Amino acid sequence: MSLNLDLLHWILAAIPIIALIILMVGMNWTAQQAGTTGIFIAAGIAVFAFEASTRALAVASARGIWDAMPILYVIWPALLLYQIMNQSGGYDALRRGISRMSRNELFIIVALGWVFTSFLQGIDGFGTPIAVVAPLLVAFGMRPVYAVAIPIIAHIWAKFYGTLGVGWLATLQVVEMDAGTTLSMGLQAAILIAIQSVLGGFMVVWMYGRGAAVRAGWPLVLVIAAIHSIGQFLVVFIDPILAAFLPAALAMVALYPLSQWSRYKEADTTIIDRPAMREEAHMEENSAEPPMDIVAAFSPYALLTILALGTSLIDRLHAWLYIPSFGLPFPAITTGMGVETAASDSYSPLHMFAHPGATITVTALVTWFCFRKFDYFNQWAKATGKEMPGVVKGLFASAVPASVPIIAFLVMASIMKLSGQNTMLALGIAAIAPAYVFAFLANGIGILGAFITSSSTSSQVLFSELQVNLAEAKGLPPSTILAAQSAGGAIGNAIAPANVVMGASTTGINGQEGAILRKTIPWTIAAFVLTGIATVIMSMIFA
């Protein structure tokens, strides 16, 4: 690939990204409207400015559609589970049960929105934590926009080493490093990721109850953040694949002794302003009695955890499930500007049974069978006096609108990648920045990659090698810059369109993606700035 950087092409490459932000955040367009518009903008720039042929455009679009399949494989089963729980009274049973177990609402929000979300990310990625936890928070009485924004922000610290190290493994596949550089990069990434954990915990508390909640919850945040951050750093020495899962699991275990702390055992009357919560939260006397108890209601999530752990940690089982796969063949393409994309006999193969979508599907089907056997659906319909639409009908009504924008975003991302627009953006950032300014901006390239592709792993694959080359050219330690790329790739998921769409669809607020982004963008900016400062300091230390 031989792209010649110039200002005009750099500005043109930035237009699709700027357009998405303006349309969704500034003009309140739905994700479906913004995503489909983004395709035409990116395609026009690819053809007329980056000399991509119509054949290249067709190949890029097809690859983008296929890139969306792993995400849709999570969304459809997650929405199926959502419909089953919603139409059987499961969410209401969870809300009542949790309310009776603990009287401290702040503690419960932190436990569900941050600790449980992080635990799920440790074992299952691809948006699973958002799809699972957001409806739980709504059931507990949280406003849907906050119920989506909180788990999105809260699970970011576990992205790079989460899903049993998928981001870490992807980085090692695309960048050649010796053992010492590899360990240094991993440890520095853990240090930068600690910023995300601390900042994420305080953001969750702030969004829930503003200053009063921060004053009440800061000890809880610091304890959990310490478990996450110090634990991740230490486990990197042992096995980076477990560097998110083990600390997240330890934090789950720590919830019980923390719940016995007098500070968090009873309701906190000092937190009066609770913008994240609905006014009717905890008003149980006017609601119907659910047909199940909390044990039955939580059993699907226990089953999901067991299946995810078993299929991931039992090596023989994982290897057996990993064998069946399917990937599409794509031809090689070359643009007029020299951007080459190699042919692939089996592009990005989908391992159907080893994918998180498989565990959610099994969980949903088992739950559906059991809940039907116990007649929960009919009992809940009679208790509420409402006619339920049916699980299948409800699934298609929610999943189809959610699928369209995700496909659109991934098609747009593929067009930008294969035409060279993404690389042009990264080269432009590096060209205008002196060495330490580039160090500050390095995590921004990772954020950009995750925003465009809706995947921290894809951001690693897309920009890791480029980041190392740029670091060497500017005399900066490659391990530090690659750590910043890894941290930025995680941060970018807070504004990744596919994550936002997934959360909106599972909480029934399709079309309000812009409102969710307005909650997550401030955190993203803060994380970017703090990570940039830390990267500069580390670059000076390790130079």
Image (cartoon, grey):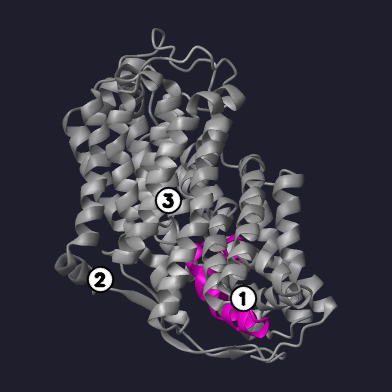
Q: CA distance from mark 2 to mark 3?
A: 31 Å
Name of the residue lying farthest toward the right: 8
Residue 417's mark? 1
Q: CA distance from mark 1 to mark 3?
A: 33 Å
| First along the sequence among labels 1 and 3 | 3
Q: Specify the label residue 229 is tagged with.
A: 3
Q: Is residue 420 left or right of residue 497?
A: right
Residue 406 image point, x, y percent? 54, 57
Kind of element beneath mark 2: helix
Which amino acid type is marked by label 3? Ser
The residue carrying pointer 2 sits among few (fewer than 14), some (14 to 19) or many (20 or more) residues within 10 Å by Cα, namely some
Hey, which quadrant is residue 137 in on the image? top left
- Residue at image mark 2: 322
Tag 1–tag 2 contact (CB < 8 Å): no
Residue at figure coordinates x 48%, y 42% from the top left = 151
Position of the N terminus by quadrant: bottom right
- In the rendered structure, the answer to whether residue 172 lies left or right of residue 373 reads right
Q: In the figure, residue 20 lies in which quadrant?
A: bottom right
Q: Mark 2: which amino acid?
A: Tyr
Looking at the image, residue 450 lies above or below residue 103 = below
